[in-house]
Amino acid sequence: MKQSQLFLNTLREVPADADVVSHQLMLRAGLIRQHAAGVYSFLPLGMRVLHKIETIVREEMDAAGAQEVMLPALQLEELWRQSGRSEDYGPLMFRVTDRHGRAMVLGPTHEEVITELVRHEVRSYRQLPFTLYQIQTKFRDEARPRAGLLRLREFRMKDAYSFDIDEEGLDRSYRAMFDAYCRIFDRIGIAYRAVDADPGAIGGEGGTHEFMVLSEAGEDTVVGCEACNYSANIEKASGQALPAAGSSGVPAKARVATPGVRTIDDLVQTLGVAKAQVLKVVVYLADGQPVAACVRGDHEVNEVKLKNTLRARHLELASPEAVEALTGYPVGFVPPTISIPVVFDRDVASVADGVAAAGAGYHEVHVVPGRDVVLTRVADIRNVTEGDLCPHCGGRLRFFRGIEVGHVFKLGTKYSRAFGATYLDEKGQERTILMGCYGLGTSRIIPAIIEQCHDEDGIIWPLAVAPFHVHIVPVNVRDEQQVKAATMLYQRLAAAGVEVLLDDRDERPGVKFKDADLIGLPLRVTVGNRVAEGKVEVKVRKTGEVQVLSLEEAFQTILHTVK
Amino acid sequence: MKQSQLFLNTLREVPADADVVSHQLMLRAGLIRQHAAGVYSFLPLGMRVLHKIETIVREEMDAAGAQEVMLPALQLEELWRQSGRSEDYGPLMFRVTDRHGRAMVLGPTHEEVITELVRHEVRSYRQLPFTLYQIQTKFRDEARPRAGLLRLREFRMKDAYSFDIDEEGLDRSYRAMFDAYCRIFDRIGIAYRAVDADPGAIGGEGGTHEFMVLSEAGEDTVVGCEACNYSANIEKASGQALPAAGSSGVPAKARVATPGVRTIDDLVQTLGVAKAQVLKVVVYLADGQPVAACVRGDHEVNEVKLKNTLRARHLELASPEAVEALTGYPVGFVPPTISIPVVFDRDVASVADGVAAAGAGYHEVHVVPGRDVVLTRVADIRNVTEGDLCPHCGGRLRFFRGIEVGHVFKLGTKYSRAFGATYLDEKGQERTILMGCYGLGTSRIIPAIIEQCHDEDGIIWPLAVAPFHVHIVPVNVRDEQQVKAATMLYQRLAAAGVEVLLDDRDERPGVKFKDADLIGLPLRVTVGNRVAEGKVEVKVRKTGEVQVLSLEEAFQTILHTVK
């Protein structure tokens, strides 16, 4: 395409309201424009990228045996009441009343609609399994839309739903989607981690993985092993248990007055001990019943793990008043030996010579877990910390920031039970269908790519999703020889199926090169003065590597790179 | 694809609530399912058809030089107030208030959004012309959704918008879209007419054509010439003027009493004259001013033509009270010689020996227009009738029913003026951009195709949009030889890029053949007993033609047909 005909306005200035690099670059390179908060238009360059991403997604979904459908954006609100999620979503759903007064919502996701649909179509085990997917615009009325395409109120998403007769089938369907996701991100050419996540947080019954693109702009913390590909989110990640300490050489415990101590930092200063020596006690209400969690002072309670350990449906921190009423101690002075049930983190056992609260204004020192405190119930209930050891290979765990771009999830029977989606098995018995759901944010992948692939001059598109493969820049369009050579190369490449952008604008070379770097096509051909010798420059955007080649060599090199 | 894995439920019964053939067949062949009134899910077979149609549309838009974008479905309502269309649309737009109380609408179309966008991007004539398009889900809260996908509340549409510096540019952009539409419908393989329409009805300034698929299920009347391709809608169509009658041999006019006559039919009966002899007078208010229209008694006033003739902004029929107040005559007795302005249809001159009202209870007979009535202002202000002569070739005009599937429209400066979308010309002068808009209902094309392409057994897909090209039906899947031959042919064809559906279900042959006819793939291969001799049957769905071929011949024939 000729650039003079492309609907494209690049911006020199960094837009004032864009604080994230990908957002700045998407605006500057003319990929998108904002219409309203969290609502954007995709302009031709941005649309080409989105279309390529969605084509890769479609191809891999098809290859994995999933079948494409299109479900409505306008959904009956009554289905959301049936599943119980209308309240859960609350103001996050756009709500519409139609001219006949019927309550509808704009679909943020499609579990309800598809389960209701499948319920009417499936009778027999012989119709199962299958996986349906769609690529579609979705709507969420986010309170604080953020950072360009990272958190939108109107966004593009691929969502898939699998339907199986049993757990093994669900495992296979889940694995097929998991593998397809890996192929999609590999093809796009982006570094990602498939992060083990906790299903409890979303209310499913089986496993779940989040696909995270690693980036400082990400909102999520990803725990990853430096040595192997173990990854989990902070709620789910688990390191190896720390070595237990013995009690040998530890004096008998002693009570000391600690007036004025309010926090663990106070305690550490006052007594001159390490944080890791402190036995921290936190009081919760689990389904309304009091329970205490005890972790090392330098560790944090992981509430998801605690909730799972307790098999509780609801878990909340007890208020200071509740703590005092339930334990008789003020917050910060609850001893690990109180009478309400206590869950001890397994790494409490690593404390050799501990310090524990002993009621208002007092602590005990030389406390040895196991010796002085009976570890009634032990479980992994803490967040991992950087430096913990990988449960798979013993390597060191590190924290990364990540942008969640995909999510695969075993739903089990959550929705099929709510909507009565059943099948008759071989014996004619009615059984509930097992479901999985698989989301992938196609519009969010764009900023995720840019966060990983840019430099100070602009975007560096991976070949597979670049809006064009090659940028041909004649330095001076008033020079006939340059124009002729550039046009010939343009036509030859285009005829060979290469996507070429020809900068035929009568602009200063500096403007053209700045735009080329900003737009960030993988290869740039500069047609300048050396065209008199039949030579052009081919530059790789990613490495900056420049080759001076004849027109024929340039053609062959580009063809070889692109095809 | 193997049919046992396809998410497909065919229905034997005609669904009770579907009265239009395409709706019945889309439900029965498992292409769609209803979610709510006017809101449907596309199932895999329907989605494949939609995807093929949209791919053809995208290819032809790209080939015509249009650039793809994606504009938001959630639109700021204030833009619709700025254009004055928020009120025009009224309850036809879904309206949403976001969590911050901001008024938004679900886009039924995108003139406002794109003009506002382009206004910010375009400064100079050098950035023009360009045409942008999108393929997208749109929303209209229709009072009476109808006939499956023919009138939806959530539907798919391609819309394009052109931006030009002058009329010649707009003509070129319009022509490029017009031609692209012709190629799209030709490629789909559907009979259509590009119907000349009146722009006034929609408020544009230039030309407009509606693309109509001819079908009895259509809601619109299309006027078409039997001999040439002249087509226009009823508002716009114009036949050749009828031959004028002379006054020779007509006696002098005479006044007769016509007590009890209320209607033209009464008059015809009472006086024994033909309807075509009557001079019918209808009184209107044009921008508040009284005006009468006079047409032949067997003709109807075309209010769009009358409005255009008068260059009026508003035209309404005068109430009986207003008629009497303005003319002094009761309705039905207003003579063509009154003092308020009268526009005479040009075919009033074809009346030789006329009858005209002459005040309450009286008529005049032997009235000769021109002799007895001065034809002060003559214009074509009537609807054509079947049998009128084509203005291009003199052939006979006929009425067809049509389904509107596309619309191209010269908007002129309607929106660019409202939003201040201007450019600086070569002399640095600010000028208003000229726009065109081009809609095409991609989801509506599906029922339009089916209305044209079906028989009593089911759908007959044109090859270009068929969900699969070939249906291979082994008659008995317990017969190893049949299964082996069918599978081999399936694999060979699939490897050659042919889209094949293999009916591997263990069903009775009758069920399989009925399903095959219903789904309507262009070619069917029946693998039955004659496979023992190496023979299969290849049947063309459209013609019913059957060939008995060897497997190799079948392969070659199919490849030849499909590629």
Image (tube, coloured by chain):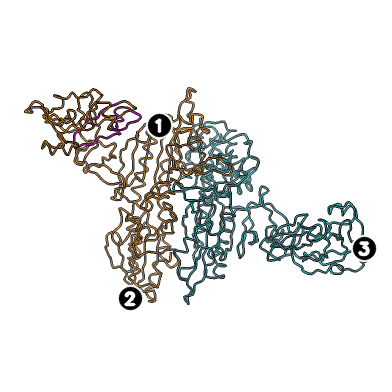
Chain colours: A cyan, B orange
User: Disc 2 and disc 1: Cα gap in Å?
Assistant: 69 Å
**At 36% from the left edge and 71% from the top edge, which residue is drawn?**
B474
Q: Nearer the viewer, mark 1 or mark 3?
A: 3
Residue placed most toward the observer, B147 or A12: B147
Q: Which mark is residue B491?
A: none
Image quarter of the C terminus of chain B: bottom left
The residue carrying pointer 1 sits among few (fewer than 14), some (14 to 19) or many (20 or more) residues within 10 Å by Cα, namely many
Q: Which mark is residue B412?
A: 1
Q: Position of residue B195 (x, y in %)?
A: 30, 40
> What is the magenta range?
B290-319
Residue B134 in the figure: left or right of residue A86: left
Is residue A340 visible in this depiction of the protein? yes
Report helix, strand or loop for mark 2. helix
Q: Which mark is residue B532?
A: 2
The image shows a total of numbered marks equal to: 3
Residue A364 image-quadrant placement: bottom right
Q: Is residue B316 above or below residue A204?
A: above
Q: Which mark is residue A254?
A: 3
**Pointers 1 and 3 in contact (CB under 8 A)?**
no
Residue placed most toward the observer, B112 or B262: B262
Q: Is residue A503 above or below residue B444?
A: above
Q: Amino acid at mark 3?
A: Ala
Report helix, strand or loop for mark 1. strand
Residue placed most toward the observer, A288 or B413: A288
**At 92% from the left edge and 57% from the top edge, which residue is drawn?**
A257
The residue carrying pointer 2 sits among few (fewer than 14), some (14 to 19) or many (20 or more) residues within 10 Å by Cα, namely few
Report helix, strand or loop for mark 3. strand
Q: Position of residue A412 (x, y in %)?
A: 57, 65
